[in-house]
Image (spheres, rainbow, N blue to C red):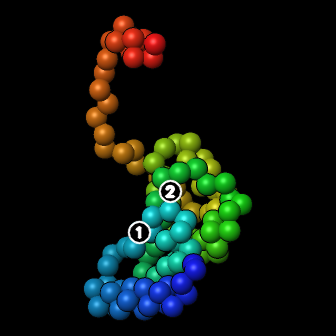
Amino acid sequence: MSRPDQILRARRRLAGVLRDSRPDVVLTYSSWSHALFAATVRSAARPLATWLHDVPGGRHWLERLAARHAPDLVVANSRFTAERAALLYPDAPVVVVHPPVQLRCHDTAVRDEVRR
């Protein structure tokens, strides 16, 4: 936000990509990219989704700026994040997509030893 000239240049480049490639959907990653690019995506009449990987508080200036352009879909990384998505986007549908990680299972004795 401290470099408005770079923001305008990035928005123009995105508009060109959206015009030339016509993607099925544009996914912004959290509040900062949504705040910067949602209006450009809307101007191109493309579906807009945002991925929330952290719980929004709804009070940060970037979150308030992002909330001005509700996405067509919110993707959340957990149910907890999904429940809080309404702070920014009260009318947007929300889906939960858990990160594809394999959790290593340790027996209780190993876990207790690590914690000690």
Q: Is residue 55 visible?
A: yes
Against 113, residue 18 (above or below) is below
Residue 18: percent from left, percent from top: 36, 86
Indicate whether 97 appears above or below 19. Answer: above
Quarter of the image for residue 1 reads bottom right
Distance (Cα) linking label 1 and label 2: 10 Å
Please state the horizontal and vertical placement of residue 103, each as a whole percent of the image. 32, 30
The residue at which mark 1 appears reads as: 27
Where is residue 45 shown, x and y percent of the image?
Answer: 45, 85
Could you tell which of marks 1 and 2 lies nearer the N-terminus?
1
Q: Residue at x 33, y 75 (%)?
A: 24
Q: Amino acid at mark 1?
A: Leu
Badge 2 amino acid: Leu
Residue toward you, 7 or 81 = 7
The residue under label 2 is 52
Percent across and percent down for residue 13 are: 38, 89
Residue 39 at least partly seen: no
